[in-house]
Each structure stands twice: as C-alpha cells, then as structure tokens.
Image (spheres, rainbow, N blue to C red):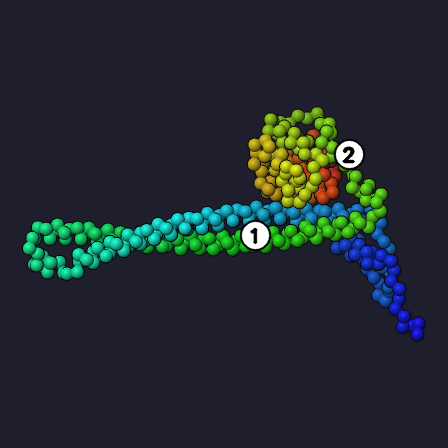
Amino acid sequence: MAVHRKPRQRPHAGSAARTAATLAFAGAATAAVLPGSAHAEPQPTPTRIKAAVDRLYHDAEVATEQYNGAKEEATAAARSLNALRDEAARRTERLNASRKALGSLAAAEYRTGGLDPAVQLALSSDPDQYLQRASYVEWASDRQAAEVSNVQRQVTEIAQLRTEAKNELAALTARRADLKKHRTTVRARLADARRLLDTLSPAERSGFERVGAARADRSAPRLGTTQAPNARAAEAVAFAYGALGKPYVWGATGPSSFDCSGLTQAAWRSAGVSLPRTTYTQINAGRHVPRSELVPGDLVFFYSGVSHVGLYIGDGQMIHAPHPGAPVRIAPIDNMPFAGATRVA
C-alpha cells in the first residue's frame, strides 16, 4: 500500500543537516526541526555562514593559545624531568662508590678488631706498636661513622630527587593530556569551519577568503607617519612587514608560517627580545599602555579572553596572523573587540 512507502530523501539533506548543526554549535544560528515535521529550516544565508565561520575560527584560536601554553609547560616539565633523572643517576653512582668504600673500611676494621682491645694489649709482644695500631683503628672507626652518615645523607637526597621526578612526570603527563585535548578542539573547530565554507558557492567562498587579502602582500608600502620609539621596536615592525603573505598555521612560530602569538614572538625575537609563547602571557610581558598612546611595535590584544594579538604599525593598523586561509596581513585594530595593549621595549 502507498501508505507504507518510504519517503524519498531530498538531495543534499545530509549536507544541509551538517551545516545547520554546525551553525547551531557555533552560536551563529539554530536549525530546529518542528515536532511532527520532516522539513528543516531554510538553508542559511552566506552572511550567517560567514558569522558562524568567524565564530569557529575564534574558538579554534582560543584552543590554539591553550595548546601553545600546554606545549610550553610540557616542554619545561620534560626538561626538568630529564635534569632530575640525570642528577639522580650521578648521585646514585657516587652513592655506590661511597658504599664500596664503606664496605672496604668495614672489612679492614673487622680483620684488625676481632679481639677486645685489653686482650690485644695483653697478648702483644710490642705494646708501643699495639698502641699505634689502636690509634689507627680508632681513626678508622671515626672515618667509618662519617662514611655511614654520608651514605645515609646521599640515600635521603636521592629519594627526594626521585620524588621530585615522580611529581614532574605527573605534571608532564597532565600537560600532554591537555595538549591532546586542545589539539582535538582546534581540529574539530577548523573542520566545522571548512564544512561551512564548503556550503558556499565558489564565488561566495572566493569573496570570503579575499577579505583583507589585498593588504597581505609583502611588498605593501609602509603605513603611518608615527615612527617606532626605538631601534628594537623598528626591527620588530620590519620583521612583521617581511612576514606579510605567509600562511597562518596554528601552533607555528615561523619562519615560513605563524599563528598570532607566534608572529609577535618571532618579530620581537628578531629584535633580541624574548616574549612568552601565548597571548595571555604576552599581555603581561611589558608595560600596559592605553589605546590612545599606541606606537609602532606595541602588542595589541583582542577579545575578552585575550585570545588574539597583533603588532601595531601606526595609523590604527596592525600586522597579524588572522586564521587558517588568511595569511599574515595588515588590518585595522577596529576589526575586533580591543582588549588592551603592551609596550615591550
């Protein structure tokens, strides 16, 4: 009977459903199915898709900075763990040498001290020689006591080192778990963004990806009449201009690709200044300055969670690494919610 026929599926239903779900997840739109209805909401507009993609890119960048921080902590923990293990091995070698010396000393004392000192004196044919030997035995006993104390101290110190190494290993394991979690989050958000972009027509996608690209050319003229306050800031700005057009890759610090904090770190590293790895640590790496006093070389931060950073170049412009598909480029600092600025040097 016709009533038992399976309804025909609409073309692209799976793609539309994935797009709607991704939009709902991104917080840019919702795609609900009404009770008792087999009809989904209309296909979202390019404007809504762009808003959702921007949100997903932002979420990915938040996770990227968390990944960068966990990676830096994991590297430090691994370095500390290796140092502790090396020190424990060196001290164990010294402990074994001390134990061997203690064993030799104990054996020598046993061979010379088997009889009571009064009996040895009574049986000795040369009392002067005996007294000299007794003096040596007393010295040896004192030395043995010192060696025992030394061995006990070394055992205690090695036990402490091993406890520290165990704690450091636990910290390293936790950081590696964080790395895995944040890496998974980044990849998931970027995959969601790619799925949304795939729903756009070639012309719409090309227009979306071209936004701001005209200012991503490495040969772009220098902007602004404001000069950098010092040679180091000028060097950092020059490096950023040289990075224009290079791709965004999350977790990258150059020289061929960058993420946002990787670019600012590399720019200032070229000027001889060491910055921490993440946006939320870079913001405290210098003196905070108000927006009205920005000069070239200042770090400018965005969003309430301080999840994005760029290098100010003057005239309200910055050079930054935006997100995958958008190379290092020049952009107005008004493009994103301003969170603060730091003057490094």
Vertical side of 222 occupied by 111: above or below: below
Residue wearing tag 1: 175
Residue beneath the point at 84% across and 52% down: 44
Q: Mark 2 belongs to which amino acid?
A: Ala
Q: Does the image show residue 28? A: no
Residue wearing tag 2: 214
Picture coordinates of residue 131, whole percent (x, y): 11, 52
For numbered disc 2, what is the local secondary structure?
A: helix
For the C terminus, give its image quadrant: top right
Question: Quick check: 20 left or right of 235?
Answer: right
Q: Mark 1 belongs to which amino acid?
A: Arg
Q: Does the image show residue 226? A: yes
Picture coordinates of residue 169, whole percent (x, y): 50, 54
Q: Residue furthest right?
A: 2
* First in residue order: circle 2 vs circle 1: 1
Residue beneath the point at 80% across and 49% down: 198
